[in-house]
Structures are given as structure tokens and as C-alpha cells.
Image: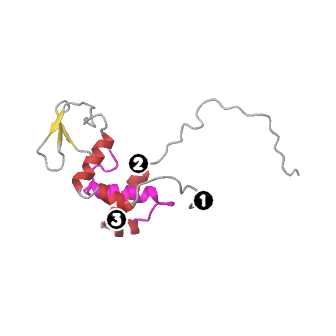
Amino acid sequence: MAKNAPGKAHRAGVTLVQLMDMFPDEASAVRWFESVIWPDGRHCPKCGSVRTREASHAKMPYWCTDCRSYFSVKTGTAMQRSKVPTRKWAIAIYLCLTSLKSVSSMKLHRDIGVTQATALFMMHRIREAWAVDDADQFDGPVEVDESYFCGATT
């Protein structure tokens, strides 16, 4: 019987080969992002309306009948206004989140086939999307016990 490695080796995850099988083409990546972003059905990211329909727009495949605007799965996300395909975004997100200390923009540009500037842009967006806002961590009343601070006296 094989012994488990120390640390968090027992956790199950998605391998790189499984990721490539999940996203063999752009359409499969778009379908996956849609299922994650809209688990209860498609809705407009601007007004929240569910009265949407498919459109013939090249870049924005959906139309909201309430606020009369085009949108896509990228609208309102870290991928907004990016020309990078969603498949490359999925791979970049995977590489960033599975690396211990993230990944450099040079490595990302080589791995997914974009320019270094685009890779840097993607890294900034991904880090911003997963940033934790702890601003309210110390919000509210604070209680301090008795303390005595002593230093050198002259």
C-alpha cells in the first residue's frame, strides 16, 4: 500500500490534461463559463433582467430586451473588453491558481501564446478578481485590555 505524501497531496484537483479535455475548443470554454456565471439561466449583467435573447452581433452574442444592450459571458467579469479567447482565459486562470506563487507573465505568454503585455494584463485582471477585501476585518468597536509599555528612560 502506497503511503500518502506529506502536505495537501490528498486533495483532488483537475490535471492539465483534464483541463485540455474540458476545453478542446472555444465553444466548450464559452459554455463552461456560461454555466459558472449564469447557473440559474442567462441574465443581463447591467440590469439583471432575464428577458434576453440571442443576437446576431459578432462580439456580443446576447441582447437584453429591457435595457436594450448587447452583452456576452465576458461582460462584467475580469475578461471584459478583452480580445483574448475564453479558452486562453481558462488556461491562464488554471495556471495562476494552481501555482504556489502564481506564474510570471513571461511564462504565461509562452504557455498560452499571447504577447508578454497581454499576459501581464491578464495576470493583473486575474489577481484583482481573486483579491480578498479585508477592509471590514477590523470594522466596529475595539476592546483593549490593560497594557504597560516600557522603554528606556533618560
Where in the figure is residue 60, as x and y percent of width and height? 18, 46
- Alpha-carbon neighbours of circle 3 within 10 Å: few (<14), some, or many (≥20)? few
Q: Amino acid at mark 2?
A: Ala
Lower position in the chain sequence, tag 3 or tag 1:
1
Q: Which residue is mark 1?
A: 6
Say what secondary structure mark 1 lies in: loop
Q: What residue is shown with label 3?
A: 117
Q: Report the residue marked by disc 2.
A: 129
Residue 48's disc number:
none
Q: Report if residue 92 lies within the magenta region.
A: yes
Q: Rounded to the nearest whole Å, what is the CA distance between mark 1 and mark 2?
A: 31 Å
Q: Magenta segment, which residues?
A: 77-106
In space, the residues marked 3 and 2 are separated at their CA atoms by 18 Å
Give the farthest residue toward the right: 154
User: Left or right of 104: which side holds 22?
Assistant: left
- Earlier sequence position, callout 1 versus callout 2: 1
Instruction: Give the residue type that dot 3 points to.
Output: Ala
Instruction: Give the x, y percent position of residue 144.
Output: 73, 34
Which residue is drawn at the image coordinates 45% and 57% (left, top)?
98
